[in-house]
Image: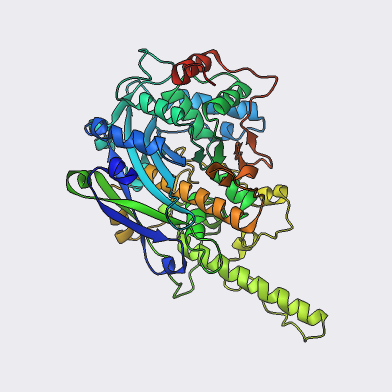
Amino acid sequence: AYAATHCGELLSFYTINNVETNMESSLVVPVIDVQNDNFKELWPAMVVAIKTSSFLALDTELSGLGNRKSLLAESIEDRYKAICHAARSRSILSLGIACYKKLDNKAADTYLVQVYNLTLLCSEEYIIEPQSVHFLVQHGFDFNKQYAHGIPYCKGNNKGGSDDQGVHIRALFTELLRARKPLVLHNGLIDMAFLYQSFYAHLPERLATFTADLSEMFPAGIYDTKYVTEFELRLTASYLEYAYKKCLTSGGTRPHVHVEFCQYAGHMSTYVDYRVCPAVASAEAQTVICPRFSAFGWCSNGTQCPLSHDTDLIILQDEKGKEDKRKKRKRHREKRRGGGDVAEDSSIFNGAPENKIAHMEVDREETPDDRQKATADPYGAENSTGDGGEALGGHSARTDAQKTAEAGTHRAGFDAFMTGYVFAYSCTLVKKEGVGAVEETEAEQSWLSTCLNKVYLSGKAAPLNVVKSTFSKSSKAHMQKMEMVWGGRM
């Protein structure tokens, strides 16, 4: 019933399971392209998807971020001021929304996923940075389509008293708040500031006021998968594509996440683009991997880099490094027991680039602070266009075939899907392995309690806690908006 109501012209489901066979087959994700000319038609399905979801994953593409050094200021308050300036002077170009609904009548940890990519057009003047244009065009963003068919919106405080009425993007954001679902982002502080400024109200001057507002806007909690991968999963790297593929290809005895999509037909199918996530293939030859891209998901040389930016190869090499390290530990144990000598020239990082070794393995005994120092990027290569992907001016080198496949795809929508998948997998892993898990009485209790309302801060060992402290008050604009959203029932 849910699928029929939500999907409209629906033929059937198709299912992709997170099992070892994913190493041999590609995952195809249907992304619904939402523009100004079909926004009204798709509105009912989007609202149903949001209201009936278990959690929502969001991602944004931005016109720029301003001064990168200011975004990494030592003072978090100064950092917030820089983010506010960027959000007030730049705009959201596209918004990705992935609605994950946990299915109770299916195998454990099965989700029905609806992915939307909204092309937006700010109706006010805004700055657009050349490096952001270059980056987005490289990844198939169509600026002609944006200016011709983008959904218009105005930033800041409500300018017409209709944020809760009509069919427009600010009203959709209001529906998202009313749904009271967990919000999932990747490296999400900048995303949240832009969402607040663009669709909600003028950003407050103080960070404490901002976090107080957020804690009431999203009472079901905010989760940052950048923080999750750093401090909960403790992956070798934590940029989004790497984290997603690591979760997707973890077979064997690891927990599985099953995702189902609607298969659209008829007129509805004309709005759907299919984003292909290629299978992780075996490395047939020795390839030198770019150590910077391997560690941070970003390289200043971009597509001109002579080294490989292939995430699949990075993952395969990391797995090989871990296996070699396990073997070396075993030989050391045998040697201590009198089991023989260990070859002096055996390397736990055999075949790995020398500069990559520091990022190949993270010992479980490391503290979060150690882990942070090992992976923090001093140049702030965490947000290029606010998408939570980790690139400032460049991305991975692509083959001509890959470039063709990516042209016109919806990066914000697919990134939102990847973000949601990492979160779903992390919840399943924690629940199965008992890491911080608690007894469940409701479905919501399966979420990551250890990561609740903790937002990743680049270069910091501790996250930003999204809470309302006894020393902070909510902003006036927020209190007025909450009265409109929930009728004062906060």
Residue 131: x %, y % from top left: 41, 39
To which quarter of the image does residue 205 belong?
A: top right
Check the image and tell me how it is coloured: rainbow
> Where is the C terminus found, in terms of image quarters?
top right
Residue shown at 63% from the left, 58% from the top:
433
| Residue 234 shown left or right of residue 88 in the figure | right
Residue 65 sits above or below residue 379 on the image = above
The percent coordinates of residue 292 (x first, y second) are 55, 55
Query: Is residue 396 among what the camera can see?
Result: yes
Q: Is residue 263 left or right of residue 428?
A: left
- The answer, for residue 130, to whether it is visible in the render is no
Choose between 440 and 267: the one closer to the eye: 440
Q: Would you place residue 85 above or below residue 30 in this image?
A: above
Image quadrant holding the N terminus, namely top left
Q: Quadrant of residue 2?
A: top left
Residue 165: percent from left, percent from top: 33, 19
- Asked whether 227 or 490 is in front, the reply is 490
Instruction: Give the number of callouts.
Output: 0
Q: Residue furthest left?
A: 266
Would you say 353 lies left or right of 165 here?
A: right
Q: Is residue 175 above or below residue 246?
A: above
Task: Residue at 40% x, 64% y: name it.
Answer: 279
Measured as percent of width and height from the top left, residue 68 is found at 54, 35
Q: Quadrant of residue 416?
A: top left
At a point 55% along the width and 27% down the height, the residue shown is 214
Q: Residue at x 32, y 25 (%)?
A: 168
